[in-house]
Image (cartoon, rainbow, N blue to C red):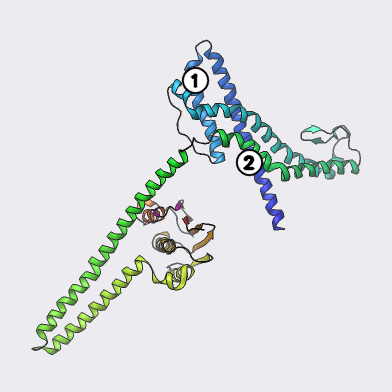
Amino acid sequence: MARVWQRLWASLDTVARLIGGLGTALLAVAVLVWIGVVVLLSCVGIGILLVPSALRLLRAVANRERARLDVLDPGPVPREARAAVRDVAVRRELAWLPLHAAVGLAAGFIGIAMPVTMLQNTTYPFWYRLLPPVDNTPSFIFWDIFWDVTDLAGALVVALSGVLCGAFIVALGPALVRVQEWPGRHLLAPPAGADLSLRVAELTSTRAAALDAHAAELRRIERSLHDGTQNRLVAVNVLLGAVRRAVDRDPAAAHAALDRAQDAAEQALSELRAVARSILPPVLADRGLAGALDGLASSCGVPCEMTVDVQGRCAASVEATAYFVIAEALSNVTKHSDAAKAVVQVAREGDRLLLRIGDDGRGGADESSGSGLAGIRRRIEAYDGRFTLDSPAGGPTTMRVELPCGS
């Protein structure tokens, strides 16, 4: 049964992609006609002035197809007509335009006609008697079948033709999608090296984010040690000096100073442990990611539903990043959201660790408001991860994180 539903959804996706291609094909036909008009007008000199705007229109339609196929956008068209015509991307778009106008239109037409005919003809035995005899001529792919249906046997034959349309979409629909998308994937793809350049720029940005995150972490540790632990140790040193001076002349004061020194030393040790845990929580090594996150859920200020589906262990740095991201997110939920419930889902899919943190609070979370979201983003981008936040005013808030964790 699951395979049947899977094939059904795959077929619906196929039809949707064919119809999407039909939309851009209709735009391509309109642009093709306009470029033809501009070429004709250029013979008398008027169309020369329209060439840049026509090429920008071509780029806009091509970018619609690029967005549909998830292909990189080459950027704006050069403003000067000669430079635009010499542009490699423009030339490839001019080659793509008539191909997509023809192939995309035909494939998209079939993508609409097949399911419509399937629905019409497979249900035909249930309503053909309601039609007047003169109109009782069913169609196949929008063309009339060349006989009149007068009985149930004929209606069942029509229904069989509808089943054949459905079988066509299931069996040959993916191939039809590939044919429709072939011009765009081969002619609208960026030139060689563009992907590499984009990747270099992305890695440069994430490297800078990693350095910023590292520097911020060092500053946080330095502040924790300076403002807390160092002051405690100074107090211990002062108290031990007082003990040395008072041990002979006032033993009672010396014992009191020793008690205070011991308390200060214990507080310094506690703060040192807190700093160490903030670098890499020992609970991750002891209990794994699932156990560590269960601890976060139990200590959260609002009821938290935690679901962890991670087989095996990820790298320690990835687990630490996931732990700190979820800890900071739950802290924000407790402090700022007025939520009644939080939900955390953690799963591993291939080489990605996926985190989803949501709450039913008031929403309106903003990275610029100082709630720690900017720090979360920097920490995630430092590991070449992805961070998205959806928090409309009035809620709910959903944070999604992807972290690479190896295969």
Which of 130/238 is in front? 238
Q: Which mark is residue 17?
A: 2
Would residue 372 be counted in the magenta stretch? no
On the image, numbered disc 1 is attached to which residue? 51
**Magenta part of the protein: which range?**
382-388
Would residue 383 be counted in the magenta stretch? yes
Give the amino acid type for the residue marked by disc 1 in the picture.
Val
* Furthest-left residue in this view: 249
In the figure, residue 70 lies in which quadrant?
top right
In the rendered image, the vertical position of residue 334 relative to residue 259, given as above or below: above
Q: Position of residue 382 (x, y in %)?
A: 39, 54
Is residue 117 found left or right of 72 in the rendered image? right
Quadrant including the N terminus:
bottom right
Give the amino acid type for the residue marked by disc 2 in the picture.
Arg
Label 2: state its secondary structure.
Answer: helix
In the figure, residue 284 lies in which quadrant?
bottom left
Query: Quick check: marks 1 and 2 in contact, CB under 8 Å?
Result: no
Of the image marks 1 and 2, the number of the one nearer the N terminus: 2
Residue 390 visible within the image: no
Name the residue rendered at 35%, 69% in the picture. 277
Name the residue rendered at 67%, 43% in the picture. 174
In the rendered image, the vertical position of residue 97 relative to residue 67, given as above or below: above
Q: Position of residue 97 (x, y in %)?
A: 58, 28
